Image (cartoon, rainbow, N blue to C red):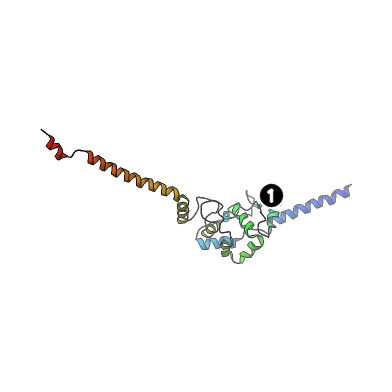
Amino acid sequence: MRAFFIPFRWTRLALACALALGAASPLQAYPEFQQSVVKTSRRAVNCALCHSHPDGPEGAAPGQIGRLTAAEQAELVRARAAFEPNAKPNSPILNAFGNHIVQSLGKRRFLELRLAPEQLAAALPKDSDLDGDGIADAEEYRAGTHPLLRSDGAPWLLFRANLQRNLPQILVVLAATLLGFYGLRHLLRGFAATAPNEEEEDLAAP
């Protein structure tokens, strides 16, 4: 009986070590992409652009590898195996944008882009807008603004997107305002026409 439990215990230990190594080694933060964004946008962009934690995946804080549960470690291993697009990874050390990148490109293409990180924005889907602010994720990545924060975006791009989104309401308000001024002008003219002037009042005086 003892000879049976020893190999089983060693099997469990080997499995735990494999999960730990799988969670700690191959997928670290890739500074090439952050450096490229900082260089292009001239903004102080941290790891929270793609990762769950602003300091990246290494560490023991929430959203980092050292804090992952066994279930999250298993999810991380599955996400790292998403070499082809549309695998729907759910890596616990990545945020929704980071997982979206891997889902859109696949891990294989993503790793290839490490040699040319400035091409990542062009490789992302042009119609993807995770935060719904009217600015494409690829544009936000290139500008160094956060694709998951609706309030974070280049001021001119946010203005243009909001203008396009609210243009029908703006036109209605503008038309109503112009019609209001037009009606008020004619109303004042009507009052002026019906009111007696001073000369008429002098002639009518006894």
Extreme residue in the left direction: 206
Q: Quadrant of residue 56?
A: bottom right
Residue nearest the viewer, comparing 47 with 89: 89
Pointer 1 residue? 72
Q: Is residue 80 left or right of residue 182?
A: right
Q: Quadrant of residue 18?
A: bottom right
Extreme residue in the bottom direction: 115
Q: Is residue 178 visible?
A: yes
Residue nearest the viewer, comparing 177 with 6: 177
The x, y position of residue 66, in whole percent, is: 67, 51
Q: Quadrant of residue 28?
A: bottom right
Residue nearest the viewer, comparing 159 with 110: 159
Total marks placed? 1
Q: Is residue 90 left or right of residue 14?
A: left
Q: Is residue 168 left or right of residue 74?
A: left
The x, y position of residue 31, in whole percent, is: 59, 61
Quarter of the picture holding the C terminus: top left
Q: Is residue 71 left or right of residue 141?
A: right
Residue at (71% x, 48% y) in the render: 71
**Label 1 element class:** helix
Residue count near mark 1 (Cα–Cα under 10 Å), binned few <14, some 14–19, many ≥20: some
Extreme residue in the right direction: 1
Q: Is residue 56 visible?
A: no
Residue at (73% x, 53% y) in the render: 19
- What amino acid is labelled 1 in the image? Glu
The x, y position of residue 185, in whole percent, is: 29, 44
Residue at (47% x, 51% y) in the render: 162
The x, y position of residue 119, in whole percent, is: 57, 64
